[in-house]
Amino acid sequence: MNRLAGLIALSLGLIAAGLTLAALARSPAFSGHAPAGFWLGVLLAWLCAWAANVALSRTPATGRLATIRDAAVPVAFGIWLVLLWEIVVDGAGVSPALMPAPSTILARLGEAAPTLWADFRQTALKAALIGWLIGCASGIGAALVADRFPFLARGMAPLAGLASALPIIGLAPIMVMWFGFDWPSKAAVVVAMTFFPVFVNTVAGLAASGALERDLMRSYGAGWLRTLIMLRLPAALPFIFNALKLASTLALIGAIVAEFFGTPIVGMGFRIQTEAAKLSLDMVWAEIVVASVAGSAFYGALAALERRMTFWHPSVRMRTA
Amino acid sequence: MNAVALALPGRLARGNTLPILVVSACFLAFWYAAAIWMNAGLIAGRSSGLDAISFAKAAWSLDRPLLPAPHQILWELKTSLFDARLGTPRNLFTHIGVTLSSTLVGFAIGVTLGILLAIGVDRSRALDKSLTPWLVASQTIPILAIAPIVVTALGSVGLKGLIPKAIISAYLCFFPVAIGMAKGLASPDSAQRDLMRTYAAGARTTLTKLQLPASLPFLFASLKVAAAAAFVGAIVAELPTGAQSGLGARLLAGSYYGNTMQIWAALIAAALTASLLVGAVTLIERLALGPKGARR
């Protein structure tokens, strides 16, 4: 307990030292031409922080303290990664056209908030979310139809497996031709990208319930629909949630990349493409930050929903026990 | 003789061959029907009073259809692969070669780094605790969107052509390989580890004699994902920078000039190349693991 608290305090102190070094690197005296002694100090501080992290990860702890320890180690590592990025960019005077400093990106996030919000609404809320909903719903629906008619499943499953390895993003120019420049064409790409993994996983999930349970349902005289609702869909939920999580990542990527093929003058992919061409990489990074935060939040929400709905599954029970 | 001929359809129906053929045939029929329906507007403007058969024929032979018929795409594919002179930008093999070379370079770099990182994570508990949560979180980030930054930033310091694209492919390979390999290195159970300890095997011997062989099935599963991801990465890396050659550039050029057939031909070529890549990894897996993973 005492060792844990001491090490966390040490980590915090070292992070404060890192922040000071970052401020120093930004000052006119050091910016762009920091002396060798400064870099030695940075290296020393980082090595101390790493040693503290190693010691922290070896500290025995139980219960809540273990949770705190397991959270503190990666957080400290992540903060130091950002700090080193900031210090190297400022201290060595790296051109902002090559790599902007995190503080510059943060400032840009604040300044360009209205533009970022408009882009987010166009790409994430319209194209990616609507495409994700349609793609997942039709993937699950097709899997249920294929399940009802096993002949169809045997014919479709291998083809769908093949299709999920294909570069489906290449459909984007064709969808632009069919559905126009605005978000429906991007949503269509997202539907095509998400359909196959959801279909394949749902088919696999529907086969996951045990023969014993299925025999029990038959002895109750339950038909296909009843067995599906009471037994096989719940048993398939872990597979379906895996597919939904995978599809959520694919959806955002698909919506952004599809915009590289032509779009109205709003959207995250459009902004990334035009700002990268103007070498204003701080705006590009700001879009990436928005995309990452939104993507992780949606993924996290799905994971939370999964824990609530599949509370009976061994992988969830083990975590809470 | 007769019995064999009678048994054959039954065996076909029990296996997956017949269902796949039937589904594929239905898909093709649907495609041809959709081609008539989608291209109808383009024909109606040009000529009227056609009977059904010549209407369908017209819909399947437009120069710039909304949806080309499958045989038109195959014809375009054949012309651009075999009729155009090799080594010229008109030949599709040139573009496949450009995209494939950056895919393979990136694949090699990404897989090497992924394996090394997995070994590091396996050796150091601190590295594992610090890095693994970020590795998992990074899976939720739309990494492909970074492609234009990398290509532009490296271009501004004079690195152009194959290297920036290879870096994106490497980046996309890196994560699945690192995660799969880390899982594989951790897969030997305690009985097997104890056996190594009773042989007085050190960390290095345990790694080479037990953990690396045990991780191969996990590695190959990741390699299949990584190969497909690297290929998509190389294609996307060609999009935002106005690259002159490569499958991505071909898609983009077709999209600018409204050349439907060129897009579809590039798309089918990309699909075939991706299947070949994944197929090659599967073949190597079979050779390395023996039939049905016998070495496990």
Image (tube, rainbow, N blue to C red):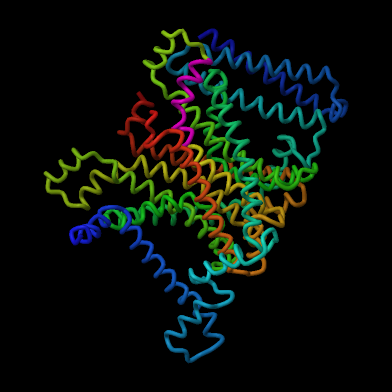
Foreground of the two, B76 or B50: B76
**Magenta stretch: includes residue A25:** no
Residue at 54%, 12% in the rendered image:
A4
Whole-percent x, y for residue A261 in the image: 63, 59
Residue B248 shows in this picture: no
Q: Left or right: B199 with respect to B169?
A: left
User: With respect to residue A21, does B231 lie above or below?
Assistant: below
Q: Is residue B163 left or right of residue A58?
A: right
Residue A27: give x, y in percent of width and height: 83, 28
Quarter holding the C terminus of chain B?
top left
Q: Is residue B190 above or below residue B92?
A: above
Q: Residue at x 51, y 45 (%)?
A: A249
**Vertically, is A25 above or below B56?**
above
Quadrant of residue B95 within the rendered picture: bottom right
- As for residue B213 lying within the magenta part, the answer is yes
Q: Nearer the viewer, residue A285 or B29?
A: B29
Residue A35: x percent and y percent? Answer: 86, 21
Q: Residue furthest bottom?
A: B49
A7 over B29 or under it: above or below: above
In this rendered view, identify the residue nearer to me: B248 or A138: B248
The quadrant in which residue A235 appears is: top left
Q: Quadrant of the N terminus of chain B?
A: bottom left
Point out residue A182 in the picture as x, y percentages from the top left corner.
Answer: 59, 63
Numbered range of the magenta stretch? B204-220
Task: Work out whether residue A129 can be spotted.
Answer: yes
- Main secondary structure along the magenta-highlighted residues: helix
For image coordinates 64% across by 60% down, the residue present is B250
